[in-house]
Image: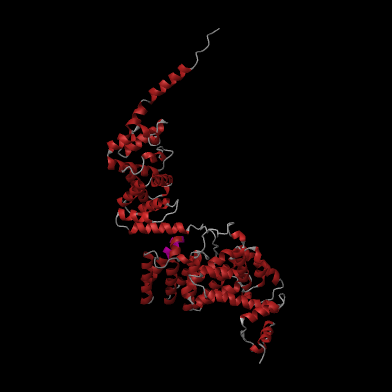
Amino acid sequence: AADPTAVALERARGGEGAAGGRSGGVYLPPHKLAAMLQEADRSSTEYQRMSWEALKKAINGLVNKVSVSNVKAVVLALFEENLVRGRALLVRSLMRSQMASPAFSHVYAALLAVVNTKMPEIGELLLARVVSQFRRAFKRSDKAVCATLARFIAHLVNQQVAHEILALQVLTLLLEDPTDQSVEVACTFVAEVGATLLDLSRQGLHAIFERLRAILHEGRIDKRVQYTIEQLFAKRKANFSEHPAILPGLDLVDADDQVTHDVSLDHELPLEEHLDYFRADPDFEANEKRYAALRKEILGESSGDEEESGDGESGSGSESGSDEEDEEGADDPAAQRLDGTAQPIIDRSEQDVVNLRRTIYLTIMSSAVVDECAHKLCKLKLREGEEIEICTMLLECCSQERTYLEFYGLLGERFCRLSRRYQLLFDECFMRQYTMIHRLETNKLRNIAKFFAHLLHSDAMPWTLLEYIELSEEQTTSSSRIFIKILFQQLAEYIGLRTLRQRLNEPDMAAYYAGLFPRDNPKNTRFAINFFTSIGLGGLTEGLRDHLKNAPKRLLEQQAAERAALPPPPPPP
């Protein structure tokens, strides 16, 4: 019997050995293969061939086990491998896995989208090969391969790895000379990519549906395919709600970081097929070190495990380096306090705030009456400074309703009467909402105005919060004027115009209403008078009208007083 080690070395040198010329051959245990890698000369062709096989096995294993739940971990593990050297291996593995499991096309597209942000060459190479294979399958009328590759292209467009023009070109090609098979593939493709085209190229999608409508009216295709087109029109009417562009768990790349490739069906694309096979690299060690530096830049590794990262092309060295760092970090005295106690962990991801807001929202939505909701919210264990989240979520829930519900006003009133702290927080919320009022829709704006009108008329909050409003043409926008209109109309409806006028004419509060009833400039005074008169509350401006009427007289008196205060001119000589 031949020695397995000798057979493996013979195959690494390029000979057939005992394997009979077939790839594969004798199985070597991982520990024995690792020992052979350690003993071999790093500059030799045999070592490069063995590391190539280890790289291929690692990439195939990672791609085969990827799923929605572990895609982030698989991406990090992939970057541990030399993807510059094995970029064609990754592309082949992704295409082979997608062809075997088309239902996981969205997962493979999400995996490639993350890799594409750091290494756009890999995304471009995969797109070139997928498009080339799709064209060959279309010429051969291979429906199964066309449908599978079209599904992959659709999800690559959804992830913005490919431009939406490619999707429109694919659909144009499929519907140019329609057959039962090509129309069925086109319908499947539109169902997968329709949500994205609806956002990015609505006119192009409309043209495609007009072409499908014409095909349907011609009646040349099979009844089953006609029914498929009718189903597609129903999906379009529902805005492709059953086929979202990207699942929440696969939305891993920000729009600013994504690299979109402009690949066309008409262009001859470089497939770089020579990268699929092993070739000896004269600068092997230098390229490995160069990728180790690139990997540290991508993953943010420390420089302490540089040697381990460079030793293991299959990722084993990087894992051992990480384990050693964890052990050293555990024994590091700097990670502990001086008094020996463990340092508290501070979560800066604000996940606890998100969880608190979710709890408050669910509590508000599940409560039937105000007392029940207030009791549940008071039982929440809030840390210092988290009371603002109750006020924020209360306003957010109120603004999301179609019409204003008094439930929210009564709940806000209950908290304001509970503690002076909540009055100050709602005062802060009023200032923030009024500052950003131009960003709100009219319905949200109306609900928030009615909410604060309830707090004011019930005296749950002091009327001093009106000091944030400055009523002038320069300081207001159309949104803020609508907000002020609804606020004061609600106050007049609650307490009556006479009582409202008495409250706004209190001498002690005049300083807080100076912005509402400006007297500094006749232009602003006229603007305020005209505004309140136009919304049916002209009775609130009697003081402003008297001020504007007597303004010339006061101006003359002021000028006379200034002249009287001047010293008399010196007598003539």
Main secondary structure along the magenta-highlighted residues: helix
Residue nearer the viewer, 120 or 57: 57
Residue 176 point in image, percent of width and height: 46, 71
User: In the rendered view, would you say 19 is above or below 481?
Assistant: below
Task: Report the quarter where the N terminus lies.
Answer: bottom right
**In the rendered structure, does residue 203 fall within the stretch colored magenta?**
yes
Q: How many marks?
A: 0
Residue at x-position 62% and y-position 70%? 318
User: In the rendered view, would you say 492 is above or below 347?
Assistant: above
Is residue 267 among the parts visible in the rendering? Answer: no
Asked which quadrant contains residue 553, the reply is top left
Residue nearer the viewer, 549 or 424: 424
Residue nearer the viewer, 149 or 246: 246
Provide the residue span drawn in magenta: 200-207
**In the rendered structure, does residue 59 fall within the stretch colored magenta?**
no
* Residue farthest toward the front in the current orientation of the protein: 339
Residue 414 point in image, percent of width and height: 33, 49
Residue at x-position 60% and y-position 62%? 300
Residue at x-position 39% and y-position 43%? 480
Residue 298 point in image, percent of width and height: 60, 63
Specify whether 24 is left or right of 421: right
User: In the rendered view, would you say 559 is above or below 104?
Assistant: above
Residue 61 point in image, percent of width and height: 56, 76
* Residue farthest toward the top in the current orientation of the protein: 573
Is residue 229 among the parts visible in the rendering? Answer: yes
User: In the rendered view, would you say 358 is above or below 501?
Assistant: below
